[in-house]
Image (cartoon, rainbow, N blue to C red):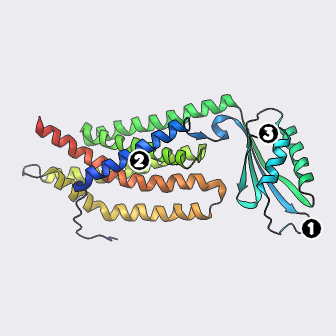
Amino acid sequence: MRFFHHTNYNFMGIRKIAATISLTLIVISIVSLIIHGGPKYSVDFRGGTFMEIRFEDQNEPEKPLTIEIGRVRKVFSEYGLGNAEIKHYGSMQEISARVDLTENTDLVFHELIEKLSNEFPGYKVIEMRKETVGPKVGKELVGNAIMAILTSTILMLIYIRLRFKELRFGIGAVVALFHDVIITVGVFSVLNYEISIAIVAALLTVVGYSVNDTIVVFDRIRENLKLLKRQAFDYSTVINQSINETLSRTIITSGTTLLVVLVLYLFGGEVLKGFSFALLFGIIIGTYSSIYIASPILVEFENRKKIK
């Protein structure tokens, strides 16, 4: 299946504009991370307790409700947990609470359930789930997550270096990877979204997806370079030709994946919201970087070689 036949878009002609856009996004991401003191970690990383609470009408359990967040916060504040992060979770009758508390959680939340029952008479207050992570475990998870991303990136560099026999291909792919990860994490920081274990899994998926897309383009570039080895040619023209020849495959692969992830984001529920958003944005930025970050780096290497 091909949607684009004999296209001739001049991608390399606007590589400087694309580089300016990418640099701007990276600066915004880094500034946002500095202002926020780093990524906003979930309970998975910083330690604490997460609780999901559901309210049901005792007379009509199936009746949809709208629970006032302010009244729930009031109960937590009276209990001495005014810094708890409380919001609707999944529906207007379900509440999530994140508390920097790791000791005596069973007793604390049992008493909170009772106080909420008193605050909302006529409603049945149900504890759906509760998860507690100690601060030591959280710090270890942060270190492991960073190590996982760095290790995967280094292995990608080694693999691409061996496969394409030229360091510039590896550098182009790795720069694109760091570009994707930094901007994706930056978007989470700008939007004040939390980084959880699921988000780290999404970032690693984005890394793999981005490299796969980049390798497809690089393979076609290498094939075209071999065909033109004994002829005079313009390097930028070869890069443009290679990207145009793989454009149909890129659009189909990225487009179908985006549709699935978009459905997951819209209808997957609150639990999968962050994960699917990271994939959604990561796939878009990964496709962009394989064309406007990884490939232009090859052109810059070739231009510097000619100058020398």
Horizontal and vertical percent for residue 304?
Answer: 17, 38
Label whose residue precedes the other's in the sequence (3 or 1): 1
Q: Residues within 10 Å of mark 2 (few under 14, many from 20)?
A: some
Q: Nearer the viewer, mark 3 or mark 1?
A: 3
Left or right for 190, reference 170? right
Q: Amino acid at mark 2?
A: Leu
Label whose residue precedes the other's in the sequence (2 or 1): 2
Question: In which quarter of the view is residue 248 placed?
Answer: bottom left
Q: Is residue 6 visible?
A: yes
Pick the front one: 154 or 124: 124
Rounded to the nearest angstrom, the CA distance separating label 2 from label 1 is 53 Å
Q: Amino acid at mark 1?
A: Asn
Q: Which residue is mark 1?
A: 59
Residue 282 lies, with reference to residue 195, above or below; the image says: below
Residue displayed at 62% across by 55% down: 272
Q: Which mark is residue 25?
A: 2
- Secondary element at tag 3: loop
